[in-house]
Amino acid sequence: MSVKVAVNGFGTIGKRVAEAVLKQDDMTLVGVTKTKPDYLAMIASRMGSLYVPEDRVEKFQKAGIEVQGTLKDLLEKVDLVVDATPGGVGKEYKPLYEKFGVKAIFQGGEKHEVAGFSFSTLCNYEEAEGKQFARVVSCNTTGLLRLICALRNHFKVKSVRATIIRRGADPAETKKGPINAIVPNPVTLPSHHGVDVRTVLPDLDVQTVAAVVPTTIMHSHVLNVRFEEPVTREDVLKVLEEAPRILVIPSELSGVKDTAKIIELARDVGRKRYDLYELAIYEESVSVEGDELFLMQAVHQESIVTPENVDAIRALTGLVSKEESLKKTDSTLGIVRSFSELIERAASNYGK
Amino acid sequence: MSVKVAVNGFGTIGKRVAEAVLKQDDMTLVGVTKTKPDYLAMIASRMGSLYVPEDRVEKFQKAGIEVQGTLKDLLEKVDLVVDATPGGVGKEYKPLYEKFGVKAIFQGGEKHEVAGFSFSTLCNYEEAEGKQFARVVSCNTTGLLRLICALRNHFKVKSVRATIIRRGADPAETKKGPINAIVPNPVTLPSHHGVDVRTVLPDLDVQTVAAVVPTTIMHSHVLNVRFEEPVTREDVLKVLEEAPRILVIPSELSGVKDTAKIIELARDVGRKRYDLYELAIYEESVSVEGDELFLMQAVHQESIVTPENVDAIRALTGLVSKEESLKKTDSTLGIVRSFSELIERAASNYGK
């Protein structure tokens, strides 16, 4: 069985999820949509995969970009749509998805209520089965949840306090800022990230504060986790090293000591668009004092939700178990479990 | 016949040139060198290609990174070395290259006098034959020369005036600036770029002024070219569109209107490390008034000299003609001649 998938919105998330879907053997990409004729629309058109809203057909024709049909034509053909429209726009499309009787996966830019169910693979994959709608939580929340659920598998987590240092804009967003300020985001505490974590883990004591800084490449988190009992640094590191989709980086040994160098490493590995699906944790930052853990981690905001979107497709359609989906997604996307595995990939990709 | 090549220095330029050499069928990469044990050294070691200066062997052993031999061991085995050491360091190595009787290609960070011959494929490929040393001019000079030599093939160029808007640092150079200033570079005019252009085209009337700005992804040039006779915009555009290694970008149609979006396009095409070997010219900026041409162009500082280094290996060793080298280099590196060809590449790479 192969799930027929549409991706509504071919921007930062949509172009990555569509590409990931193409790599799976149990799903088929039927088409993607664009509202604006630009070079991404040209690429989708060249692939024979471009659908546009009815009222945009003429605009694309004028730009000389051939379309394969309308959004409604596309929804007729699929079982499931990944909504990768801009934040807040997904809810406008929900009635259409309902009308066409398709399952839909929304992104973290939508409110929890739009789907009524927020998804993060490592935390609640099994709860998705049979549902029509799911919402893959945002990049920052995905990063927080990967860490928290990995820790909860082995320790009793009492509370989580996190400072989110957000990137100001994505790399190509030349009209967004800040370019020279640190912006409390928002200035009324807490930030929404902790609230968003609780859409997946309702009982967790979690509080977050966020600030936006002038960078485009990654978010960073400063974590303070309190456990019910004392833990050792060794035990925590072991859990993080064995957890899926978490990459522990030995900074001193490798020279990979900041977000710019993490991205440079992803470039050198040969990851398309330098995507880093893994949550990156600086090994040296992992510190334990009694029942308290401190660490710093970095999130590639553009790509970290890609594997979770692929899993969500399987989870909603009941294709396979969590373990099997994790395995399929991670092997097709080239996700690694360790720094040395990443170095091996870089060496074997070199010159190819 | 296959030229045996070493790359001395495995940084921004070295890692790209070594990778490009691996893709050629008429040259062999014997090894690369590193002075610092870091993740790039780990990658080279994993490839079985890592050589280090004699006084660094112990340092690498301590870091647990296996080396294949010393720089001298490497020089014993090769016909030619591409010196990609930091600017100004290449001249220190020249006596060693002479001692081992190997040909050497230096980079634009060295003075012209170190090699005595400065190289740019489209301008003076044939003059390299039989020489022991060549210097591939810097990224900015390569960008200027590609444009100028393409124009000189069809028009009589009287003078060139250019403003170079330089990136402040490469993406991973987190210790360099500026992060919030526009820095005249230098404040005493002219900048060295015009002088550098004349190391290849000694008779050209060219003057340049440069300023450094807070960005890491590309340089930009504002060009004012004066011809002996009036030209038409149409003729100039035709020349640029037909010239090798120049990519004319239709900004209005594609939405690719700034350096960030050029790089985003390179990411979407699937270029490793988002390398853009082509000189990018904004089509809409190309303006002609009588005998004067104005335009804006962008240079990917990390990668633009890669193809010229590969050509320089062939030029120094007399392997093939300029036309044949251009063809081999460009097809192996996936260099395109037009925007629509780039879109085709993006579509055919999608999901691969």
Image (cartoon, coloured by chain):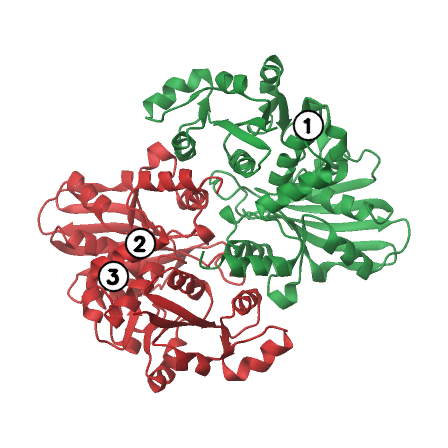
Chain colours: A green, B red
Residue lying farthest front? A1
Asked whether disc 1 touches disc 3, contact meaning CB atoms under 8 Å apart, the reply is no
> In this orientation, does residue A323 appear?
yes
Residue A283 horizontal/vertical position (percent): 70, 60
Give the number of marks: 3
Label 1 to label 3: alpha-carbon separation: 56 Å
Residue A141 visible, this angle? no
Asked if labels 2 and 1 share a chain, the reply is no
The alpha-carbon separation of the residues under discs 2 and 1 comes to 46 Å
Q: Give SS at disc 2.
A: helix
As drawn, which residue projects farthest toward the left?
B229
The amino acid type of the residue labelled 3 equals Thr
**Pick the front one: B3 or A256:** B3
Circle 3 SS class: helix
Disc 1 element: helix
Position of the N terminus of chain B, as image quadrant, is bottom left
> Dot 1, crowdedness within 10 Å: few (<14), some or many (≥20)?
many
Please determine whether, in this image, residue A130 is positioned above or below residue A228.
above
The image quarter in which residue A28 lies: top right
Residue that mark 1 sits on: A316
Whether discs 1 and 3 lie on one chain: the answer is no
Which image quarter: residue B330? bottom left
Using the image, determine if residue B305 lies above or below residue A324. below
Give the residue number, with chain letter if any, for mark 2. B330
Mark closest to the chain's N terminus, 3 or 2? 3
Q: Amino acid at mark 2?
A: Asp
Task: Return the chain for callout 2.
Answer: B
| Quarter occupied by residue B90 | bottom left
Residue B20, image x and y in percent?
A: 39, 60
**For mark 3, what is the residue?**
B121
Between residue B209 and residue B175, name the one nearer to us.
B175
Q: Residue at x 24, y 53 (%)?
A: B147
